[in-house]
Amino acid sequence: MLQISAGRFFRPDISINERTHRRTVYSNGWLLDQTPVKLPVGTIIGSTEIQGVSTAMLEAVDRLEAKRPDGTDDFLFATGGDELIDDIAYVMTFALNRTFSRNHDQVHRLVLREDAADRRGSAASLFPGLFEPQQVIHAADLDTLKQFMNALLTLAREDFVRVMRVIRNTIDATRRAIDDPTAAYTDLVAALESLSDDNLTTPATWDRYDGRARKIIDAALDGENQALVEKLHAAVLEAERVGLKRRFVSSTLARVSEAYYRNEAVGAVRPPQSADLERMLSLAYDIRSRKGHVLEDLGDEAWVFTDGAETVFEPTLRRILTLAGLWRLVRHVVKRFVADAPKTEPEPWDYRNALPGIVRMQLAPQYWVWQSDGFDAQTAEMRLNGVAEAFIAWGAGHSDEGIDLTGVIGKVEKLVPSMPDGAAKAAMVAIYALWHDWTDPKDHSPGAMNFLDTHADYLEAPSPIAFTVGVLSNRGIPEWTVDEWAELATARRTARTKGKETPLPTSIDVLLQLTTADELETAGRHDEAVGFAANAVEECPGHEDLLLWEKRLIAGDHDPNFNCHKFLYGKEIVAEPSEHNPSIPPDESCAAAEEQQG
């Protein structure tokens, strides 16, 4: 929201809608000068005298283009404002190391009470400054904030989003550290890792490679000639360089400047020494991995009794970075990243999908499958899936909408003759066949019979698309051999597992596996049938009719008349066809479809 409200993406000569949002934020910081302070985005106004938790007013102007890229008036005048204010508060918190939040209860819980007898175990002991009460904010602090925000706003969009994600996640981690310190620790490490860059990764030297691994490798190479030993050492170090851990350590170290050990360390308790930082980062990564992989927590000595120290002695690991140490390191690395990253000039960009509160979902098929615009070879398979879903929904009574594919059918007739063989062409033929099988003959295309005869192979040769047409129309399922059924169902299952299948309704995938199991059981290939029956059940987990059918098949009491019609539409009696609405195939079982075909 910050870059959008700053006008980074607006087109020239386009009117702008503006709305001012104001929110109260709670903070352990107090503005020394109570006059309004204008930031690159927003204004902060001190509201109370210095207290343990003070209040301030954050004001920001929500700015959006009044016209969409297509020239129409934009219906969205402004966002709700909370996200914009929160983004400003996050950046202020990060840059100033002072808490700013709209959450009254959270801030009062985290900020150390002025009359607290013991600070141990408090959020203030974990993150000095961030949750200390009555922290004065001077004019120089605000200048630092403005410089950071200005640099942040001029980042390329990808870098900006990356940094804002780190800022939000790390601040959220500090706020829940009291409840789950290990999770907060791993989140801080993960934030650093998200800024890793292959270009900053450097190999370790053999003497600094992991000691245990080095001993094992050197023992195996004992007695080999020196050239081979050096070659293998180099290969191991290169493999380690491209690893995620080395990438994390190297990238972080590359962004640590002299200031980290000098003026920024003034007042810090036991700050990291430069000679130890590489090892500490490696240990921090290991701690993150242990939490993520085996749910191992940090010992209390790593956080409870640190009292703001940035490093602590941990019995099994020697000195490690504490939460306070990681927090200062994250802030330093992010500031270096923002300062060093390329800056960009404002340029037009359709930012609407990046606005808060946008929920992306696919419309029900009946609302889009009839649109001929955008229908082509690239979208044909997805369109077939939508058409099948729409017909099934209409047959089940879930939709009363008519489906008029006249425009789509016209494009199929124009496109198919010149298309190469393949799934896209088959999908178009299938859409054409389904439309003409499900509609009143008076609505058929004049050349429909000739078109379908010319491309009949696409509806007869074994394929998931041909099966779909067979199940959803009065054509019936083609007569394929048992081996063809097995090959088809196996190939479909493999494609489904890899995520490379033609999209089809779940019920179609179920019936393909089920029908294959039927065919194999009838042919006496029981063990194979049981495998495909399992596939059918697992495509629609928990379906009682499928579970009963599978149980009977396994027990040798095969039911060859599974009610496909009921499975597809959820009922056995359907309405009569009407103009521009599909007619429902009357068969009640998979077997009935095959008998009708015969």
Image (tube, rainbow, N blue to C red):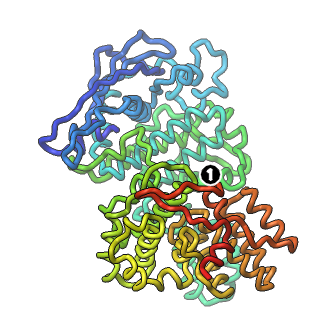
The furthest residue to the bottom = 225
Depth check, front residue: 595 or 192: 595
Q: Quadrant of residue 425?
A: bottom left
The furthest residue to the right = 555
Question: Residue 90: x and y, percent?
Answer: 43, 33
The furthest residue to the top = 49
Question: Residue 441: x and y, percent?
Answer: 41, 68
Q: Is residue 135 left or right of residue 6?
A: right
Q: Quadrant of residue 301?
A: top right
**414 w.r.t. 131: above or below:** below
The residue shown at (39%, 55%) is 368
**Is residue 12 visible from the viewing direction of this image?**
yes
The residue shown at (63%, 23%) is 119
The residue shown at (65%, 57%) is 572
Question: Residue 273: x and y, percent?
Answer: 53, 47
Question: Residue 146: x and y, percent?
Answer: 30, 33
Q: Bin the neighbour count of mark 1 within 10 Å (Cα to Cα): few under 14, some 14-19, many 20 and up.
A: many
Q: Under tag 1, what secondary structure?
A: helix
Q: Is residue 142 left or right of residue 129?
A: left
| Quadrant that contains the N terminus | top left
Mark 1: which amino acid?
Answer: Arg
**Is residue 206 visible from the viewing direction of this image?**
no
**128 w.r.t. 281: above or below:** above
Q: Is residue 262 left or right of residue 151?
A: right
| Quadrant that contains the C terminus | bottom right
**527 w.r.t. 167: above or below:** below
Residue beneath disc 1: 288
